[in-house]
Image (cartoon, grey):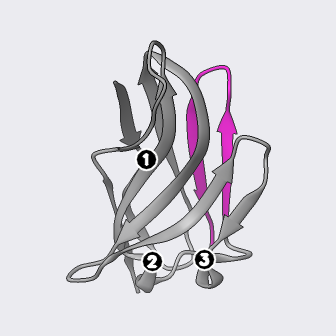
Amino acid sequence: QVQLAESGGGLVQAGGSLRLSCAASGSIFSIVTMGWFRQGPGLQRDLVAGFTSDGSTNYADDVKGRFTISRDSASNTLYLQMNSLKPEDTAVYYCTVRARTSGSYAYANYWGQGTQVTVSS
């Protein structure tokens, strides 16, 4: 299986920045997509940013120009650089990958444990 360890969340004031990290481990054969979702209090989990294996990216409209998704292939780590944070960015952020493990023919979705981001006004 694939394990995703998230870190980097915290408390920041509006206008501040955070960088989230998601380190993937396990018997990973290939990763086809990677991304970040977030879930605010009492809300559904929505896509924030996605990163495919060929380098293309997608962002939610309300984070474009403020958030940047990136990866370090050598360490199998996914990042989300969040700048100009707003109180409405407050949420639990979840890393997700779609990957195939060694010895398996099937792809599956994997999720991190979530990391809390709180932005104060």
Q: Is residue 106 above or below residue 19?
A: above
The label shown at residue 89 is 2
Q: For mark 1, does the 10 Å Cα neighbourhood hold few (<14), some (14 to 19), or many (20 or more) residues?
A: some
Q: Is residue 23 above or below residue 120?
A: above
Q: Nearer the viewer, mark 2 or mark 3?
A: 3
Q: Dividing the image into 4 quarters, which one contains the N terminus?
A: top left
Residue 13: image quadrant is: bottom left
Residue 58 screen position, x and y as percent: 69, 66
- Mark 2 Cα shell of 10 Å, populated few (<14), some (14-19), many (≥20): many
Q: Residue furthest front?
A: 105
Secondary structure, mark 3, is loop
Q: Secondary structure at mark 2?
A: helix
| Numbered disc 1: secondary structure | loop
Q: Earlier in the sequence, mark 2 or mark 3?
A: 3
Percent across and percent down for residue 113 are: 27, 46
Determine crowd level at label 3: few under 14, some 14-19, many 20+ residues with C-alpha closer than 10 A: few
Q: Which mark is residue 60?
A: 3
Q: Amino acid at mark 1?
A: Gly
Q: Quadrant of the C terminus?
A: bottom left
